Structures are given as C-alpha cells and as structure tokens.
C-alpha cells in the first residue's frame, strides 16, 4: 500500500470545503457533474503534491505577485516535472489535473478565485511574491 501524503490530503479537503464538487477537471460548473476529487486516491495525492512543489518553485522566482490561470499553471507544472526528471519517472507521474492545481494552491494559502463562476472549470491563482 502506498504511503499517504498528508499535506496533499489536507489540501484536497480544504479545497473541497471551499469549492464543493471540485473535480480533476476543475471547479464545478452548472451543466456538468464530475466526480469530486477523492483525497484518498494515491494518484490524486501525487498530482496535488507535484502541483504544490511546482507552485513553490514558481513563487521562489516571483519578484511581485502574479495571477495566472489554473490551466496554465497545470501545464507549466507538467513541463517542469518533465524537464527536471525526464528519465527518472514514468509518464503517469507527469500529469497534473486542473483540479489538483487548484487544490494545491488552496493548500498553500494562495488566493484562488473562479475564472467565470458556474461556467468555467478554471480558476485564477495569485502566486505571491517570494519572501526575501
């Protein structure tokens, strides 16, 4: 049995409190019903963990606060992992869902706002500047 990543579980739980119905696809929208993120699924924990690690890297390079879309950040995290660990991990580990990115940002205490509430799966995430 895989080890539980408690920080990822806590981030998912916090995100689900803020956005009930948060799924791998992203924020809940009016005309679709996706399965909510399950904090006890190992690959969900791994995706949130990867997203949290990437957001810390993104924050370390920030000279000022910047707001980016969750979908953009999800792809940046995937590229970052691929560039850093190209030969050391399997391709399944490279994937980060939109919902995992949103949960990671909430878990880190970043400002997360729906892009278009009820109509868009995406969120706007403010990555705060690095503390000097």
Image (cartoon, helix red, strand yellow):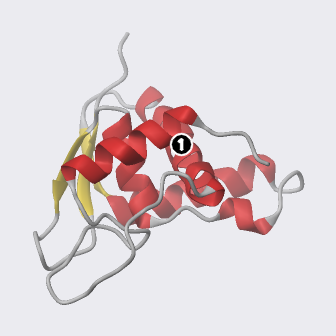
The residue located at (29%, 32%) in the rendering is: 109
The residue located at (45%, 56%) in the rendering is: 100
Q: Nearer the viewer, residue 9 or 54?
A: 9
Q: Secondary structure at mark 1?
A: helix
Tell me the quarter of the picture where residue 127 sits. top left
Q: Residue furthest bottom?
A: 31
Q: Nearer the viewer, residue 27 or 13?
A: 13
Above or below residue 78? Residue 32 is below
Above or below residue 37? Residue 9 is above
6 left or right of 59 in image: right
Above or below residue 22? Residue 89 is above
* Residue 60: % across, % down: 46, 27
The residue located at (52%, 49%) in the rendering is: 48
97 left or right of 91 in image: left
126 left or right of 60 in image: left
* Residue 5: % across, % down: 61, 38
Q: Which residue is mark 1?
A: 54
The residue located at (49%, 52%) in the rendering is: 39
Q: Residues within 10 Å of mark 1 (few under 14, many from 20)?
A: many
């Amino acid at each position: 049995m895989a080890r539980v990543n408690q920080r990822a579980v806590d981030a998912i739980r916090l995100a689900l409190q803020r956005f009930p119905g948060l799924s791998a696809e992203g924020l809940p929208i009016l005309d679709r019903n996706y399965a909510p993120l399950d904090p006890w699924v190992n690959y969900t924990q791994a995706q949130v963990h990867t997203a949290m690690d990437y957001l810390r890297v993104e924050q370390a390079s920030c000279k000022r606060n910047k707001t980016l879309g969750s979908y953009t950040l999800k792809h940046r995290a995937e590229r970052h992992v691929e560039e850093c660990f190209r030969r050391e991990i399997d391709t399944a580990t490279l994937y980060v869902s939109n919902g995992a990115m949103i949960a990671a940002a909430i878990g880190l205490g970043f400002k997360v706002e729906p892009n278009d509430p009820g109509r868009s799966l995406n969120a706007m995430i403010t990555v705060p500047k690095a503390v000097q």
